[in-house]
Image: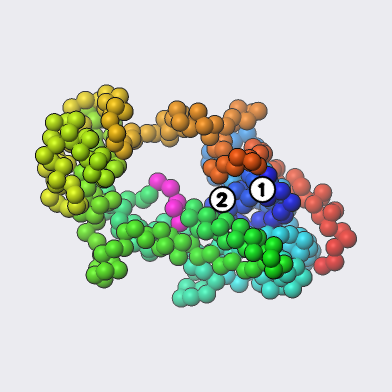
């Protein structure tokens, strides 16, 4: 596997850091997850619980080793420092300054291990206007304006279904770690990576800030091309109370559907988003409400357009494409898992679909460090 021989110390909790380190583990890195004594990582206890821990934790903890260290103790901090000094990568998600107070900040570790790639993921970055301020995903979605773009039919912000700030910051962290490891081959030195969840999500707005950058004003959300102003980027009801989406605004797709439905003359209304598209929206509203979802899935499959049903999660994971590509995996205990998204032809991933018990690898891992000076 691509990352075989890479050793990672994972000091992160919840989603951004663990999402990053799970990707590393899936592709062969040895990931040592450091947990506090007692209850361990809080993710172990996020409902629903599974046979060993929780579904959340097995998704974020698979293939990793669990080492329990009490970082409030001198011995625990010394053991962690020794772990870091022989690692290739360290990922932490403490508030800024906490790792340094524990004696395992980048400068201290790099002084002993100049090849370390050290990634810190925090809400607002290691410096700036909000030092030490805590935040989770929803607050960052609010602060970046993402919630102002995600409006329900009542015009109020709606809570997105997935924590996008968590996920994109984890992916930026992953990219940074891999870039630093690649550069280390030439220089022999690692680097320090400062990932801000705030900035990660703000950067994800690159396709929706046109009005703001050009005119210094907020967009009229309901008239924008991807947030309500296009008949061909919209959710429609069907007669059985289900929904489908039409989600392709290229003119060829517009002409294909409107032509098939007997309204080719409406295509010219759809060249630009805005209120002038309402007749097309009204027409499609009425058409799609006339028959059930299953009918429309069969019908739309005969046309070259972009569409999809609004699935429940059970329906989504049963999707024929995911099944055929082997993305849904069942382990020996009958538990479901997602396979790694990145697929290599020559060195495919071989994930271990098993999460560690709390402290399962503590003794073995620390025993291997006995000869290393702190």
Question: Comparing marks 1 and 2, which lies closer to the viewer?
Answer: 1
Read off the magenta span: 161-165
Residue 258: image location, x then y, percent: 18, 35
- Asked if the residue at tag 2 contacts the one at tag 1, i.e. Cβ–Cβ closer than 8 Å, the answer is no
Residue nearest the viewer, comparing 244 with 72? 244
* Whole-number angstrom distance, CA of label 1 to CA of label 2: 18 Å
Judged from the image, the secondary structure of the residue bearing numbered disc 2 is helix
> Image quadrant of residue 139?
bottom left
The prevailing secondary structure element of the residues shown in magenta is loop
Q: Residues within 10 Å of mark 2 (few under 14, many from 20)?
A: many
Considering only vertical position in the picture, is 323 above or below 146? above
Q: Is residue 45 visible?
A: no
Res 19 label: 2
Residue nearest the viewer, comparing 32 with 262? 262
> Image quadrant of residue 248?
top left
Residue occupying the point 24% across, 61% down: 219
Residue underneath mark 1: 2
Residue nearest the viewer, comparing 92 with 299? 299
**19 left or right of 82?**
left
């Amino acid at each position: 596997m691509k990352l075989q021989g890479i050793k990672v110390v994972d000091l992160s909790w919840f989603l951004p850091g663990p999402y990053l380190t799970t990707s590393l583990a899936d592709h062969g890195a040895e990931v040592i997850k450091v947990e506090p004594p007692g209850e361990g990582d809080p993710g172990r206890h996020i409902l629903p619980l599974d046979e060993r821990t929780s579904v959340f934790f097995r998704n974020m903890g698979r293939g990793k080793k669990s080492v329990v260290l009490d970082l409030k103790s001198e011995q625990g901090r010394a053991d962690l420092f020794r772990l870091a000094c022989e690692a290739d990568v360290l990922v932490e998600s403490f508030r800024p300054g906490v790792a340094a107070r524990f004696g395992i900040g980048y400068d201290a570790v790099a002084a002993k291990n100049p090849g370390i790639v050290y990634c810190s993921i925090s809400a607002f970055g290691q410096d700036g206007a909000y030092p030490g301020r805590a935040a989770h995903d929803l607050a960052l979605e609010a602060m970046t304006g993402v919630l102002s773009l995600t409006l329900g039919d009542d015009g109020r912000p709606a809570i997105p279904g997935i924590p996008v700030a968590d996920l994109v910051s984890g992916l930026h962290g992953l990219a940074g770690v891999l870039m630093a490891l690649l550069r280390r081959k030439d220089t022999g030195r690692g680097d320090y990576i400062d990932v801000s969840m705030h900035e990660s999500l703000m950067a994800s707005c690159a396709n929706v800030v046109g009005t703001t950058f050009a005119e210094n004003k907020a967009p009229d959300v309901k008239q924008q091309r991807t947030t309500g102003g296009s008949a061909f980027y919209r959710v429609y009801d069907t007669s059985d109370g289900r929904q489908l989406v039409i989600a392709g605004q290229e003119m060829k797709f517009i002409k294909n559907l409107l032509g098939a439905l007997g309204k080719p003359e409406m295509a010219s209304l759809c060249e630009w988003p805005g209120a002038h598209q309402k007749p097309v929206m009204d027409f499609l509203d009425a058409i799609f409400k006339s028959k059930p979802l299953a009918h429309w899935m069969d019908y739309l499959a005969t046309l070259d357009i972009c569409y999809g049903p609004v699935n429940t999660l059970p329906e989504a994971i049963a999707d024929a494409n995911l099944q055929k590509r082997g993305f849904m995996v069942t382990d020996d205990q009958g538990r479901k898992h997602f396979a790694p998204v990145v697929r290599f032809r020559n060195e495919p991933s071989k994930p271990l679909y098993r999460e560690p018990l709390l402290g399962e690898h503590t003794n073995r891992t620390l025993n291997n460090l006995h000869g290393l000076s702190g």
